[in-house]
Amino acid sequence: MTDAAMEISGVTPDRFTRGSRLVDALSKAGLAFAILAVMLYGSFVSPAFFTSGNLLNVLTSMSIVGIVVVGMTFVLVVGGLADLSVPATIACGAILSLGLQPMIGPLPAFVLAVGLAGLIGLLNGVLVGYVGINPIIATLGIGTIGLGIVQAAVGGVIVYGSNPASAEFAKGRLFGIPVVVLIFLLIALIGHFVLSRSFWGRWTLATGGNYSAAEASAVPVQAVKAGAFVITALASGISGGLLGLTLQSARPLIGAGYEFSAITAVVVGGVSIIGGFGSVPRAIAGLIFVQLLTNVMVLGGVRTPIQGFVLGILIVGAVGMDAALRKRGVA
Amino acid sequence: MTAAADCALDMRGISKTFPGVKALSDVNFAVRFGTVHAVVGENGAGKSTLMKVLNGSYAPTSGTIKVGGAEVRMRRPADAQALGIRMVHQEINLVPDLTVAENVYLGRMPGRWSFLRKGEMVRKAAAVLDELGAAINPRERLGNLSISQQQLVEIAKAYAAQPRIIVLDEPTSSLSEHETAALFRILRKMRDDGIAIIYISHRLKEVLEIADEVTVLRDGSMIETRPTEGITAAQMIRLMVGREVSNVFPKSPAEIGESVLRVERIGDGTRFRDVSFDVRAGEILGLTGLVGAGRTEVARAIFGLSRLVEGTVSVNGRKVSINSPSQAVKAGIAYVPEDRKGDGIVPGMSIRENISLPILRRLSRFGRIKRGADRALAADYVKQFSISPPDGERRINLLSGGNQQKAVIAKWLAAKPSALILDEPTRGVDVGAKAEIHNIIGQLVAGGMAVVMISSELPEILGVCDRVVVMRDGHACEPLEPAELSEERIMALATGEEMA
């Protein structure tokens, strides 16, 4: 018998088996401390950090990724690894919500764009949940196809907005808070409610925690798994639509990199990469930390390669911590 | 031979303390070469902890260990293996995607200059399996085997390493009587070869049959070590629980009513066909047979976890078509699976979250789970089944096997089924919890539920069930009526000595 097999024998690998409350509290407090530390450091590095202009900027750009993060949390929790089709769904949302404006008006264009993004998610979901294809491969494939179609549809050129009123709205403020931020908060609240309070959320956690047991407990596991990808695609579609409206232009590669930003945030927030554990607030805490850190690095004049280096270490560190916690649960 | 050389293992004054728990206190445990030494005790008595100390997984807080007369210090399982100590776990620890032969020789594959000698490996594995009397093709992918066959592969793997001391943890829990007899033959052969065999089991009858000596543990302490000659199962139980357990299978008489679940000529196209039986309200129908006869497959298909290609299923006289577990639940059928860890519990969730899982929708309004109803449901069952610790918020994987099983049964009762299928419900649980589970089943049928109980344990089948269906090679016999029930009759049907 191999050592590894001996090591894990007879004990369920579990994240917080022993001293669970303490470790749980520490992992939550740890992130809060990290956020405070970054803010403190930021205020030393640059006087520009604590200006309302800078913080609003961070908040706005965070909101666009944040909407995707809410969806991505479902994908990780359900045990679906990651959704790599996010750039395609964002592009779909952005390009269609601008491109369709002259034909059907801004609001229907937006809704249709999000709906079509959701369709891409449905394809992902069917492949992953019902056919059983590895999520990385399925979403990469569908994403590439989706992006290709979107590119072909607009002829590979940039699409511009034609409805100033909708641009005003997207860039506007309500009670002094940018509309984009408000929409993000609303979506985060809904996402949190669904994951933590609704039966769908409980099903999502159960499916990620033990697929066969959930299946044997009459949980519609295939639909739940597929649903996570639909949720992510809808969120990305909304995110892309808002991005297009704010920028008033959209190119096919507008969403490039968002999938990694979202995955980074979720993982740094401590959501388990193999499923069954996590929450929307955790993922958002991870997002805040990563976004602030990036902002502070930019303000502090840290060069781009170094920034990538730091973010990479963060991801590896977070995933390593997840693995270590599991192992500790075993001992 | 001197006394010291005769002694395969001598553990003295072993204590093991976890933060807040004393799992073992001052345990003395000695095993001689060429004997089978049973270790018995209720779940939580310290058997597993003691064995984990023995195989190097845990370092003892205090105490000494001598193997073959020499004091040793083991810091990891590899140290124990190097000393010739092998362990066969109750749970399968093999690689499903490798072949049987590759699993048997995992980590010790024969070869030269890092080139694998596949032919030699297959030949050697075939020889070992043959010696064990297991009809398993060494080239078969492990994952294609049934659980009982995988268990035999696990034993073959330990045996192939030619150990000095071999520990078997509940080796028969997934074996049929027939396979158990084969295992005992090989254990006796290993014993006669001079191997020291440590045999952990809840099945006292087997302990009496195979073991030369028995050590009883209770609450982390060694209660007694004595020869099995002259001791009875009742005496052992008394030592284990510290009290007298009068009737191992308490049976409450229930009024038998109308037929609730009826299956007619069902088949899945491969593993079973032409299976018919019915179970009536207030009745416990036993479904037994050798492992691999198709019992679990029948249950899973009725519950919609796999497909039926022929035959009909009716509930309360109405024909139902079931393609998924949720349709089964709607039809009034519930199923407590055989593999508790794999199919029964969601380990990261609390008792409460596990119990309410099948009926979450009923507990929700506008998608939101009603917290009060969720909590009350769990609290009810925790109390009714005296699940310990009595805290619904406890993570279910922190409970003992028996308590996990009670929670899994509770999960299904919450769905208020009219027919309940229990697949090996008392497998791997201790004597006390077993009696409690039998009690629960008794209450259910008293309340008018129809119960199908799958079990490999004949005394359990005979003690609990009203009628019994025996399966062999995917076929089922006519239900045996109470007057026809005997171990001999069931074995004859199960092994094919008597045709159904």
Image (cartoon, coloured by chain):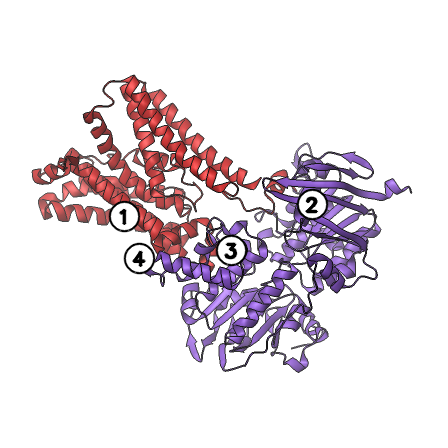
Per the image, the residue denoted by label 3 is B390
**Residue B78 position (above or below residue A298):** below
Amino acid on which disc 2 is placed: Leu
CA separation, marks 1 and 3? 33 Å
Asked if one can make out residue B231 in the rendered structure from this viewpoint, the answer is yes
CA separation, marks 3 and 2? 27 Å
- Does label 2 lie on the same chain as label 3? yes
The secondary element bearing badge 1 is classed as: helix
- Indicate the colour of chain B: purple
Q: Quadrant of residue B62?
A: top right
Which chain hosts label 2? B
> What residue lies at 43% left-to-right and 47% top-to-bottom?
A276
- Indicate the colour of chain A: red
Answer few, some or many: residues within 10 Å of disc 2's Cα (few below 14, many 20 plus, some between 14 and 19): many
Per the image, the residue denoted by label 1 is A190
The secondary element bearing badge 3 is classed as: loop
Q: Is residue B210 left or right of residue A300?
A: right
